[in-house]
Amino acid sequence: MSAISTLGGLLRGSLIREGERDYDRVRRIWNGRIDRRPLAIAQCMDVADVIACVKVAREHGLLLAIRGSGHAAAGTSLCDGGLVVDLSRMKGIRVSPGDAVVRAQPGVTWGDMDHATQVFGLAVPGGTDSEVGIAGLSLGGGNGWLMGAFGATCDNLLAADVVTAEGKFLTANAAENADLFWALRGGGGNFGVVTSLAYRMHRIGPTVIAGAVYYPFDQAREVLARFADFAHDAPDPLTVYPCLIRLDDGTPVLCMAACYAGPVSEGEGATADLCRLGTPLANQLGPVAYVAWQSSMDPARPAGRRCAIRSHFLAELADGFIDVLVENFSKCPSRHSVAIVEHCHGAIARVAPEATAFALRRNPYHFELIAFWDNAAETAANLEWADRFFMQTSPFSTGEVYVNSLDEGEGERIREAYGVNYGRLIRIKRQYDPTNFFRCNQNILPASE
């Protein structure tokens, strides 16, 4: 009996094989540029299904990929010729408002999480897209609108249940399997299949001050230079992402997207100077439902659109970097592409780099270039633009990269993602996965020291 047939008899969930009716629909992921064909996709319903997948894949030498929401740009949730462990049906959420703790399964998205927690006026620091899965974001670190006030997503992770490469079920927290818990907070999917996550929640909303101020493209240089001064004294609850985007008619603009994670009365004053960095085209900052703001970026990033990401960290917004940013964005071949500078300060920056596997705490700007396009015939032009743009910004880089922003083919940058923590991660990988069974990820090799 084949491995796939054996597995089919063990699952409570569905096993979709190559060639079956739903196969092409189910294997699609967020990034339409990624096209891989696994032997089968196991739509797991519970931990028992996950354990069965791991044991069968290990026994039969099958390549294994783990899929939560399938939102990773690098397409690590898919593999060719192997088995995909699809966790998207595992969507249980249990909110304990009295303890300010929420427990959730790995198929939960941030939209699901916000829906469940905001009814109590609480939230877990998440990302900027409601369709992103909680597991992938948490395991890679977790930058988002609440990071200045409450830290990275992984800083708010209290515990995780994990199925190891041997098919064992473990709980990892500060007191139990503490080394594994440290590694999970930033080390990605290298150490096992996470089947449950527990988080600390924080009081936020239901209304926040959020939105964007739009400036003409010809003011981008001066506004960004003034923003560098503004950012130096920005209060912790205020997170701002200066973004170069194009409007629907193709006009390039500078969009200062912002969220104040505190009382509305304070937020109005804290964001006021964002409208005084130049002469705005429009000011859309104001009171908005937190859940609405969390999903406001979704329309610009629809599932199935082709995507390529390039990123690194910056110590400052140097004039030379700003010049490169503006010059290269003006040559963008697609109106859907964006260039983002995330200001990472406050609580996320006060955690010691060695406290979690997510070490990127000391440099305040995360530059992320995202090329988006719809037509496959435009792939070469958009990739060439992204690579040239990225290369010209590299002289300003600190030599660090956010692991969740690594793209397909960027595995050689893995040391940049972990810095001082890389050696410890190798040792923990060697302990929990010495054969590198979990390798469909931004891979940490167990023997690379």
Image: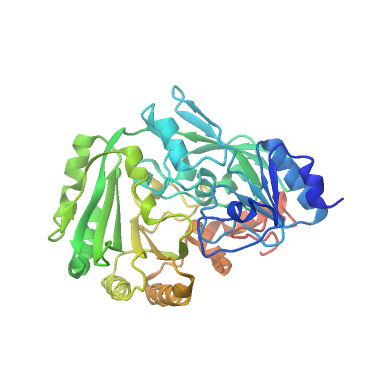
- With 189 as the anchor, is 253 left or right in this view? left
Q: How is the image coloured?
A: rainbow
Question: Is residue 284 left or right of 202 when viewed as pictured?
Answer: left
Tell me what residue is drawn at x 40 percent, y 76 percent: 385
Can residue 63 be seen here?
A: yes
The image shows residue 152 at horizontal and vertical percentages of: 43, 46
Q: Is residue 281 above or below residue 115?
A: below
In percent of width and height, residue 343 lies at: 33, 55
The residue nearer to you, when weighing 197 against 251, is 251
Residue 235, position in %: x, y?
26, 45
Res. 226 visible in picture: no
Check the image and report above or below for 165 versus 443: above
In which quadrant of the rendered view does residue 436 lie? bottom right
- Along the horizontal axis of the image, is 375 left or right of 54? left
Residue drawn at (67%, 58%), measured in percent from left and top? 439
List x then y, in percent, for residue 383: 46, 74
Q: Nearer the viewer, residue 432 or 192?
A: 192
